[in-house]
Every structure is written in C-alpha cells, then in structure tokens.
Image (tube, grey):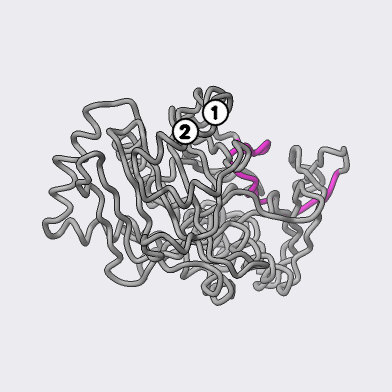
Amino acid sequence: MGSLNIGIAGCGIGGLAVATLLAKQGHKVALFDQFNAPSPIGSGLVVQPVGLDVLHTIGAAEHALRLGAKITSMEGFETPSNRKVLDVRYENGFGLAIHRASLFDALYQCARVAGCQIRANSKVQSTELQNGGRVITLSSGKVCGPFDLVIDASGANSPLSPLRAEPITYGALWGVVDWPASTALAQNQLQQRYHSADKMIGILPIGTMPDDDTPKATIFWSLRQKDFDTWQGAPLADWKAEATALWPDIAPFLSQITSHDDLTMARYKHGAMWKNFDTKLAFIGDAAHVASPQLGQGANMALLDAAALAEALAKHPLQTALPAYQKARRAHVHLYQFMSWGLTPMYQSDSKIMPWLRNWILAPLSKIPPFPWLLSKIGSGNIIPPIQRPRP
C-alpha cells in the first residue's frame, strides 16, 4: 500500500520504536511529545530477548548493548532465613538491564536517522475524526492533521486511551546510584530480598548512561501506594535502617541516597483493553495494557506492540491492518496479564498465604524439570509466540 501520514502521541519507548519502523517503511511520521526537548523519565528496566529482537530490527540494539548490562539470572531470597525462593536463569541469551535514558537515546537516534519528525513541547490532549482522517488537538489548542492514522503511545495516563485500569495496592520507590566498588554483588544478576510479601528490596545493575561511563544500579523498595506520604515525612535514616536490617549488603548502595527526593514513587495499575484500536486509531504499550513489573515485561510489551503494528501495516491495507494487529498481540498480552495478576501478590501484598505458596510450593517446583525451562521462557517473554501470525 502507499505511504500514510501518521501521527504518534508519546515519545517514549513504544512511540519511538513504532515511529522508526513505520518511517523505514516509507510512511510520513510525526511524533508529539510534551517535553521542551524529548527526554526520558524513570530509572532501570529489563529488555527481554524478544524485545532485543525488535531492537535489532529497528537498528538500536548495538547502541543499547553498549550501554546496558547483560543479566543472566534473577534471584530472590526470603529473610531472615536467607532461603532462595526465586531462581530464574536464561537458558539461551540474556536480558538487557538498562537505564531508561540509555534505551531512549538508542531509540531516539534511530528515529532521527529514519526521518521521523519530532515535535517537542506538544502535549496531546485529544483526537477526533475530521476531514476523512484523524486530527490531534494539543493542550495549546493547536490542531494538527488530519492524519491517516494516529497511534497512542502516551502511556498509562494517556488522555486518548479508554483503558480504565485498577490501581495495585503496592507500588515501589526507585532510585539510581553508582555501582559501589565495595560490593561483592554480581553485575549480571537482578537480586531481591523479601520479608513475607509486604517488604521487598532489590538491586538491578543497569550499565552506564549516555553521557557517563560510571556503572550504575537501580534500587527499588516495595511500598504501599497509600504509605508514600508517611514515608516521605519520616526520617530517611529510619528507612535506611529498616532496609539494611532486611539486607545488609544493600548498605553501600543506600549510602548514596541522601534525600527522599533521590527516590521516585512508581504507582502501578493492572488492566488491558480487549480491543486495542478504533477508527484510524491504534493503542500500544501502557496506553493499551498495564501491569505490575514483577515479570519484567513492560518495555518488552511496548516494543512487541510496535513491531506487530508495523508488520500489520506492511502486510494489510489500513482498514484490515488494525484488526490484524490486535489479533497478533492479543494472546500474548492477555497471558502475561493473567500471570502478572496471579504472581504479583506473592511478592507485593499484605497476604500471608501467597508468600507461603511462593516459599513452599513455587520455589521447590522451580527446581524440578520442566519448571526451570518454563520459568526461563516466561522471563524471556516467549512462553508463547509474542506475535501471532497466520499459518501458511
């Protein structure tokens, strides 16, 4: 089919990925972003093997691999027994732990090279059908378009998405610090410590930043969303003492946290759209589905949505491409949504039963074949094909 005029709301991972893929197909692509200059927010994340495949297709993998840290396993220990209750290893390949700024930089450079037009200081407020296409209205009141297709990649708080997700009781505090020379922790593992399911702390090595070659780590601490104000009002030393008592090895990381403002509260929701498109409008990433980060699939899902939508537009005319995109992603999205819904209370909840099941049922099973292979497939993001394609 011919070239389309496409407007994309959101200059994050999904928006940049789909913009580059579509620009490479010859479409005219405009990205709208609310920042004065496009820039990332957040801290560390993991791109799983299927997401890395998408980065290779885009041309961003080499840049991302140079900055990120290769993760070969994920381990979690219950305290005070120090009993291992999470042990997930990549049977083939690795996960790429990376700061969002580094992944953004890799994708942003590809989008620029592909010829995408990036419109900064342009917060999208709404979209509607008009003049045979779809227009975008910015918060300034300016109307842009019409576009043949609008793609909503503006995240969980999208003003365009009809998704109504349910808040999860627990969120997490996230912060970035330098990797301490004094620690014996491995730089190829995600490590966590739990006390029941109401306390969790973790360390994720994330490689380096685009403008800083110092190795970095992301710290995360589980916290009820309603308790954030209380935490922020209490002495920081109290929290450090609690975290260090849970995991003494965390001390050289925590010593770099000098203010409550060094940590950011991430608030999680759970939900997915059954229909991820409308007339000349498609939803990808967190605008279409959100979940807790327990399975480490957030960035993956956005990249896979971008790849599936681009593939559908390459193979079908617009009126059938969007249903094809939905069909390609529906099974994978909903399976991981279900698994996230089921597993999250084992690691973040006030339940006493769920962490018991984690410790005494799931942990022993995880050592018995074929469960190690199954856990590796779940973590890698390919327990089922992430993009369903019709059989020949």
Looking at the rendered structure, which numbered label has been put on residue 235? 1
Q: Quadrant of the C terminus?
A: bottom left
Q: Residue at x 55, y 36 (%)?
A: 265
Q: Is residue 254 left or right of residue 214?
A: left
State the residue position of label 2.
239
Percent across and percent down for residue 196 are 27, 33
Q: Is residue 155 magenta?
A: yes
Residue 17's x, y, as percent? Answer: 61, 62
The residue type indicated by label 1 comes to Pro
Out of 166 and 240, give the one closest to the viewer.
240
Res 161 label:
none
Dot 1 surroundings within 10 Å: few (below 14), some, or many (20 or more)? few
Q: Left or right of 330: which side holds 79?
A: left
C-beta proximity under 8 Å, tags 1 and 2: yes
Can you give x and y, in whole percent of width and height, for residue 140 in the image?
Answer: 87, 39
Task: Answer yes or no: is residue 324 visible.
Answer: no
Q: Is residue 169 magenta?
A: no
Residue drawn 14% across the image and 40% down it: 360
User: Hey, which quadrant is residue 193 in on the image?
Assistant: top left
The residue segment tinted magenta is 143-161
Q: Callout 1: helix, strand or loop?
A: loop
Residue 80 visible to the viewer: yes
Label 2 sits on what residue type?
A: Trp
327 in relation to 195, above or below:
below
Quadrant into which the N terminus falls: bottom right
